[in-house]
Image (cartoon, helix red, strand yellow):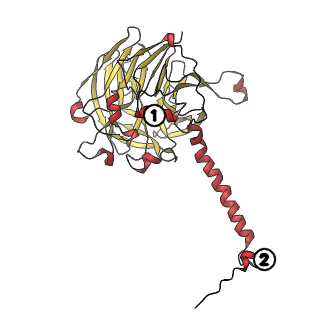
């Protein structure tokens, strides 16, 4: 039996059994929603790719900068303001090439990472020895770090370390991911020993990248680079807004997620007044949060810059410094071949005390230096010692610590 299809409405809309006005209204409505949504998600990604960005060399004088080649692959550096000592969470370039879960390197190594100090006044490097901690058994694979003076004794320091250690039960890390924990140590300013206090392991600590500790040696906020350890999330995390988070832990009472659905969370730092700053890498901004009595975080505001950013630090004057990545595609090449130059820059975020404040410009955003990779390459952290006029730069795949004099 043959069925005759009535297609006259395709030729003559007047006999269309559907309401064409309604159909076109729906079509326009869909486009009105989809196009802005696509722009919302893709515009930051296009900007963050840096395809049209031109690197300009300024702010760093090679004659005033030195390279400390003894210190390699130090993802995070922290200044101890009172002594001027720099604390560094370091590895080796060979280790980073094999084991770095954040970029899907899952070939566990037997060599352990380490914490070091660098004294700019003497150029002395000291690798700190570990007490009460069996690194051979559990592994030590360092990424983020914070160093916080004790609330009871300013000479005593608590050192918080992200340890992305291999799985403890022999499982394939490419399948189950790293067994990530936070290690808490204590030391004295200028000392050469780290005494282990506690390992914090919790389901909320999924893929930790950086952390900000408190002066009691027990509490800290941290960023999850992904909300899953492995799988599709590692491929798509830069395309979606919901693949990272901010967590909170108390070493005696456990952990929780303080902020869900954060857009590409990375560096985190806590200001003396308690404000929490978090870097949104592909969001091209730092976001500010206020701690609540229940340890949750309330979003205050965000401040934009022109490049993706990594770790954060705060100098003595209260300026927040962010390590910038002007050419993210070069960063990726740098992770595959650490000798490949990766341009760097540094952003400084401060309160606007100039005339613009009257017109609502609350914050001054300044790019304080930029380099094509010849003076500093692949920097993931920049630290400013405002008191002594020094600028420090290092990175997870950097071949050396860069120290520059700014006075």
Find numbered disc 1 in the image and state the secondary structure of the residue it sits on: helix
Which residue in the protein does label 1 denote?
333
Q: Residue at x 59, y 23 (%)?
A: 56
Find numbered disc 2 in the image and state the secondary structure of the residue it sits on: helix
What residue occupies the far right of the structure in this picture? 14
In the rendered view, does 300 fall on the left or right side of 249? right
Answer above or below: position of 407 versus 312.
above
What residue occupies the far bottom of the structure in this picture? 1
In the rendered view, does 95 fall on the left or right side of 355? left
Which label lies toward us, 2 or 1? 1
Residue 163 can be seen, yes or no: no
Foreground: 95 or 143?
95
Could you tell me residue 219's position as x and y percent? 39, 33
Foreground: 351 or 391?
391
Foreground: 60 or 350?
60
The quadrant where residue 167 appears: top left
Residue 79 can be seen, yes or no: yes
* Crowd tier of the residue under label 1, counting other residues whose Cα lies within 10 Å: few below 14, some 14–19, many 20 or above: some
Q: Earlier in the sequence, mark 2 or mark 1?
A: 2
Which residue in the protein does label 2 denote?
14
Q: Are marks 2 and 1 in contact (CB under 8 Å)?
A: no
Could you tell me residue 391's position as x and y percent? 49, 17
Q: CA distance from mark 2 to mark 1?
A: 60 Å
Q: Residue at x 22, y 32 (%)?
A: 136
């Amino acid at each position: 039996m043959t069925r005759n299809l009535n297609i006259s409405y395709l030729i003559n809309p007047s006999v269309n059994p559907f309401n064409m006005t309604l159909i076109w209204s729906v079509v326009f409505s869909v486009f009105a929603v989809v196009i802005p949504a696509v722009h919302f998600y893709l515009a930051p990604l296009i900007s963050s790719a840096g395809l049209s960005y031109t690197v300009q060399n300024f702010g760093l004088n090679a004659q005033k900068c030195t390279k400390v080649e003894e210190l390699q692959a130090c993802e995070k550096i922290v200044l101890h303001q009172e002594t001027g000592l720099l604390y560094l969470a370091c590895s080796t370039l060979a280790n980073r090439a094999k084991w770095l879960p954040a970029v899907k390197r899952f070939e566990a190594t037997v060599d352990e990472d380490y914490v070091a100090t660098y004294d700019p006044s003497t150029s002395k490097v000291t690798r700190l020895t570990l007490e009460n901690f069996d690194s051979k058994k559990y592994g030590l694979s360092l990424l983020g770090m914070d160093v916080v003076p004790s609330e009871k004794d300013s000479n005593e320091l608590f050192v918080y370390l992200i340890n992305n250690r291999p799985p403890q039960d022999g499982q394939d890390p490419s399948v189950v991911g790293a067994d990530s924990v936070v290690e808490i140590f204590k030391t004295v300013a200028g000392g050469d020993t780290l005494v282990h206090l506690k390992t914090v392991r919790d389901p909320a600590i999924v893929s930790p990248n950086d952390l900000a500790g408190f002066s009691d040696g027990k509490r800290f906020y941290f960023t999850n680079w992904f909300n899953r350890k492995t799988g599709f999330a590692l491929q798509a995390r830069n395309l979606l807004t919901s693949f990272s988070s901010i967590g909170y832990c108390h070493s005696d009472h456990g952990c929780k997620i303080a902020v869900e659905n954060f857009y590409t969370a990375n560096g985190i730092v806590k200001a003396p007044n308690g404000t929490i700053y978090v870097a949104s890498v592909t969001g091209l901004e730092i976001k500010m949060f206020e701690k609540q009595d229940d340890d949750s975080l309330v979003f205050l505001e965000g401040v934009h810059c022109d490049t993706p950013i990594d770790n954060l630090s705060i100098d003595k004057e209260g300026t927040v410094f962010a390590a910038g990545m002007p050419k993210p595609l070069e960063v990726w090449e740098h992770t595959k071949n650490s000798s490949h130059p990766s341009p760097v820059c540094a952003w400084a975020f401060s309160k606007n005390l100039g005339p613009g404040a009257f017109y609502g410009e609350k914050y001054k955003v300044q790019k304080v230096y930029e380099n094509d990779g010849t003076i500093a390459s692949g920097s993931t952290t920049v630290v400013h010692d405002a008191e002594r006029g020094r600028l420090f730069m290092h990175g997870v795949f950097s071949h050396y610590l860069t120290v520059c004099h700014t006075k």
